[in-house]
């Protein structure tokens, strides 16, 4: 797997929503999060710049979900339900993209995956300068 890849196409499960991403630092930004929403969706996200996500087709099928402060925008396909990408409230200048939606990428490609402390969100914690690490997920493939 080439973790330095910068430009990838992606799609939801039913292929209705198709998009292109220009990643900020390849797949090196892969992470999970402990916030209430991310715990349930369980996706691995990678980072793209604010102008780094281009919907190629199926934009009309994208549905936006917001909760709590309504600052973050989570997009998913209204047909198959797959989360495609989101604009986080902690940094609206980039998108988090579901790595599993990207061509040739699997969430199991990441052996050690940092997990951000989304329960104690940096915008809710005085003196915080950014996401804190809650832990690391480790994947051990069966031999």
Image (tube, helix red, strand yellow):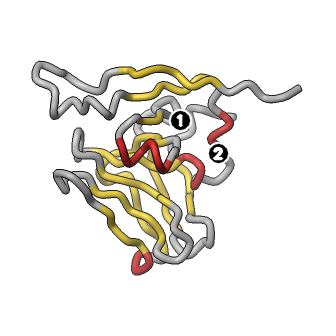
Q: Position of residue 133 (x, y in %)?
A: 38, 20
Structural crowding at the residue carrying mark 2, measured as other residues with C-alpha within 10 Å and reported as few (<14), some (14–19) or many (≥20): some
Tag on residue 127? none
**Image point 45% across, 49% down: which residue?**
97
Horizontal side, residue 85 vs residue 69: left or right: right
Q: How many marks?
A: 2
The residue positioned farthest toward the left in the image shown: 126
Q: Position of residue 15 (x, y in %)?
A: 60, 71
Horizontal side, residue 92 vs residue 54: left or right: left
> Residue 125 appears in which quarter of the rendering?
top left
Horizontal side, residue 59 vs residue 137: left or right: left
Horizontal side, residue 28 vs residue 62: left or right: right
Residue 30 versus residue 112 in the image, above or below: below
- Which residue position holds label 1? 27
Q: Are marks 1 and 2 in contact (CB under 8 Å)?
A: yes
Q: Position of residue 136 (x, y in %)?
A: 52, 21
Name the one closer to the observer, 132 or 10.
132
> Residue 118 appears in which quarter of the rendering?
top left
**Image point 40% across, 57% down: which residue?**
53
Q: Where does the N terminus fall, quadrant-wise?
A: top right
**Image point 45% across, 28% down: which residue?**
115
Which secondary structure, mark 2?
loop
C-alpha separation, residue under disc 1 versus residue under disc 2: 9 Å
Mark sitting earlier along the chain (1/2): 1
Residue 66 versus residue 135 in the image, above or below: below
Name the one closer to the observer, 81 or 17.
81
- Which residue position holds label 2? 105
Which secondary structure, mark 1?
loop
Structural crowding at the residue carrying mark 1, measured as other residues with C-alpha within 10 Å and reported as few (<14), some (14–19) or many (≥20): many
The residue positioned farthest toward the right in the image shown: 143
Q: Position of residue 34 (x, y in %)?
A: 40, 35
Q: Where does the C terminus fall, quadrant-wise?
A: top right
């Amino acid at each position: 797997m080439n973790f330095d890849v910068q430009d990838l196409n992606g799609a939801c499960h039913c292929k209705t929503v198709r998009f292109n991403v220009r990643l900020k630092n390849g797949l090196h930004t892969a992470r999970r999060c402990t916030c209430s929403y991310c715990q349930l969706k369980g996706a691995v996200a990678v980072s793209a710049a604010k102008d780094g996500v281009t919907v190629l087709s199926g934009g009309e099928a994208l549905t936006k979900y917001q909760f709590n402060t309504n600052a973050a925008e989570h997009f998913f396909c209204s047909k198959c339900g797959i989360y495609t990408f989101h604009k986080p409230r902690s940094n609206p200048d980039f998108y988090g993209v579901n790595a599993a939606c990207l061509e040739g990428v699997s969430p199991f490609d990441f052996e050690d995956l940092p997990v951000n402390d989304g329960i104690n969100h940096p915008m809710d914690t005085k003196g915080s300068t950014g996401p804190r690490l809650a832990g690391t997920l480790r994947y051990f493939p069966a031999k």
